[in-house]
Amino acid sequence: MDTNSNPCRVLIADDHPGFRDAVRRMLEAEASFTVVGQASQGAEAAQKARQLKPDVLLLDLAMPSRSGIDALRDLASSPSPIRTIVLTAAIDRFQLVKALQLGAYGVVLKDSATEVLSDAIRGVMSGHYWVAREMVDGLIEALRSVVSAGSRSPQKKFGLTERELGIVETVVAGYSNRDIASRFSISQQTVKHHLSSIFDKLGVSSRLEVAVFAINHGLVKRQ
């Protein structure tokens, strides 16, 4: 995120006033962020997101009067792009995958929010997905359970070749570089070359980001 540009406009949605206030004070201590509003319920979060059009929505998954997942569903058809970072107190892998499928760009554990939230916001504003390191392996496993590798009909290919699309499917399916090389009868160095090309074309920087991007943009077909 360009720190010389206008401050990133943030909406905080969480049902605990003390947590909201702590996040607000932390963000407003930096000139690159401004908090434009707060919400304490899922329905209110969706309403204020449409009204205030923030750059980033910090969204608690566990809120009364429609959950964070419900709020994400409500905002899925919104014409204004809002990059959402979901906040959670515990790792529920399948719930987090659902949030990512519904368009969330990041996942931050509440107990680490003060250490990583600023970086997470900058990351998603740069177009990247942000997922805490301790969640990565579990999310890959959960992604594998909701995807039928090998059956796809992508509406948009993002400049990927047929071979690269095939490799994206294997990444989502959890294949290692060695497994991918064996499947396509190519060298592991060629696999690395293809992955580098895929990263560049999709604007991502990790295998997890490839998997999430593929799910969100229909590059592989969900079960």
Image: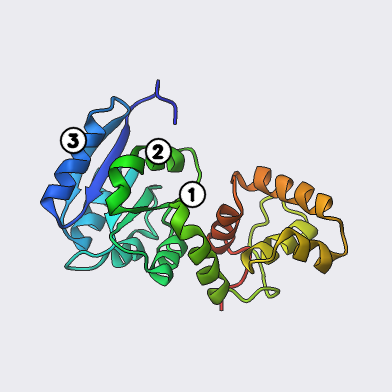
Q: CA distance from mark 2 to mark 3?
A: 16 Å
Residue 27 quadrant: top left
- Using the rendered image of the protein, determine whether residue 174 is visible from the camera's viewpoint: yes
* Spot occupied by residue 7 in the image (x, y as percentages of width and height): 32, 29
Q: Secondary structure at mark 1?
A: loop
Q: Which residue occupies 78% across, 47% down?
A: 193
How would you rate the neighbour count of disc 2 (Cα within 10 Å): few for under 14, some for 14-19, many for 20 or more?
Answer: few
- Is residue 199 found left or right of 75 in the rendered image? right
Q: Secondary structure at mark 3?
A: helix
Residue 134 quadrant: bottom left
Sequence-wise, which precedes: disc 2 or disc 3? 3
> Disc 2 residue type?
Asp
The residue nearer to you, when weighing 113 against 149, is 113
- Is residue 93 found left or right of 211 in the rendered image? left
* Spot occupied by residue 64 in the image (x, y as percentages of width and height): 17, 67
> Disc 3 residue type?
Arg
How would you rate the neighbour count of disc 3 (Cα within 10 Å): few for under 14, some for 14-19, many for 20 or more?
Answer: few
- The residue carrying mark 3 is 25
**The disc label shown at residue 119, or none:** 2
- Using the rendered image of the protein, determine whether residue 55 is visible from the camera's viewpoint: no
Mark in front: 2 vs 1: 2
> Is 110 located above or below residue 97 in the figure?
above
Q: Secondary structure at mark 2?
A: helix
> Disc 1 residue type?
Tyr
Badge 3 vs badge 1, beta-carbon distance below 8 Å? no
Instruction: Quadrant for the C terminus, please.
Output: bottom right
**The disc label shown at residue 129, or none:** 1
Number of marks in picture: 3
Sequence-wise, which precedes: disc 2 or disc 1? 2
Sequence-wise, which precedes: disc 3 or disc 1? 3
**The disc label shown at residue 3, or none:** none
Q: CA distance from mark 3 to mark 1?
A: 24 Å
